[in-house]
Amino acid sequence: MRAYLTTLSTAEQAEFATRCGTTIGYLRKALSTKPRFDGAPVRQLWEESDGAVIREELRPDIFGEQAA
């Protein structure tokens, strides 16, 4: 997710977070503290980034091969 966010301007980051139902502040905090996102927010991050945010990396237990 960090790599994707760095490709966006500050305004685009805020818009992305809003589309995902959160704030850029929360996403930045999440990157620094590594909380465990629920599956629905991970799916939203993945969908809104057109797959650039890799859901398998955020929740391999839900979206990884072994979870299938």
Image: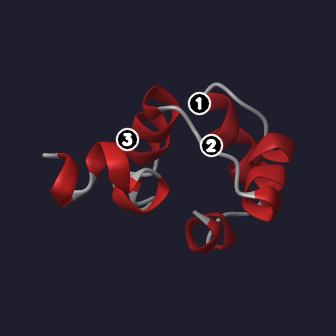
Nearer the observer, 25 or 13: 25
Residue at horizontal 52 percent and vertical 32 percent from the top: 38
In the rendered view, tell whether residue 62 sits above or below residue 49: above
Q: Amino acid at mark 3?
A: Glu
Instruction: Give the colouring mode of the picture.
Output: secondary structure
Bin the neighbour count of mark 2 within 10 Å (Cα to Cα): few under 14, some 14-19, many 20 and up.
some
In the rendered view, tell whether residue 14 sits above or below residue 41: below
Q: Position of residue 29 (x, y in %)?
A: 84, 52
Q: Mark 1 or mark 3, which has the lower sequence index?
A: 1
Label 2 sits on a secondary structure element that is: helix
Label 1 sits on a secondary structure element that is: helix
Label 3 sits on a secondary structure element that is: helix
Residue at horizontal 71 percent and vertical 30 percent from the top: 22
Position of residue 23 in the picture relative to residue 18 (left or right): right
Tell me the residue that label 3 is attached to: 47
Tell me the residue that label 2 is attached to: 16
In the rendered view, tell whether residue 59 sits above or below residue 3: above
The numbered dot on residue 31 is none
Tell me the residue that label 1 is attached to: 19
Measure the C-alpha gap from mark 2 to mark 3.
Answer: 11 Å
Q: Amino acid at mark 2?
A: Phe
Dot 1 and dot 2 residues touching (CB under 8 Å)? yes
Residue at horizontal 71 percent and vertical 57 percent from the top: 34
Q: Position of residue 9 (x, y in %)?
A: 74, 63
Residue 64 occupies which quadrant of the picture?
Answer: bottom left
Q: Position of residue 32 (x, y in %)?
A: 81, 63
Dot 1 and dot 3 residues touching (CB under 8 Å)? no
Residue at horizontal 68 percent and vertical 39 percent from the top: 17
Measure the C-alpha gap from mark 1 to mark 3.
Answer: 10 Å
Nearer the observer, 16 or 42: 42
Q: Amino acid at mark 1?
A: Arg
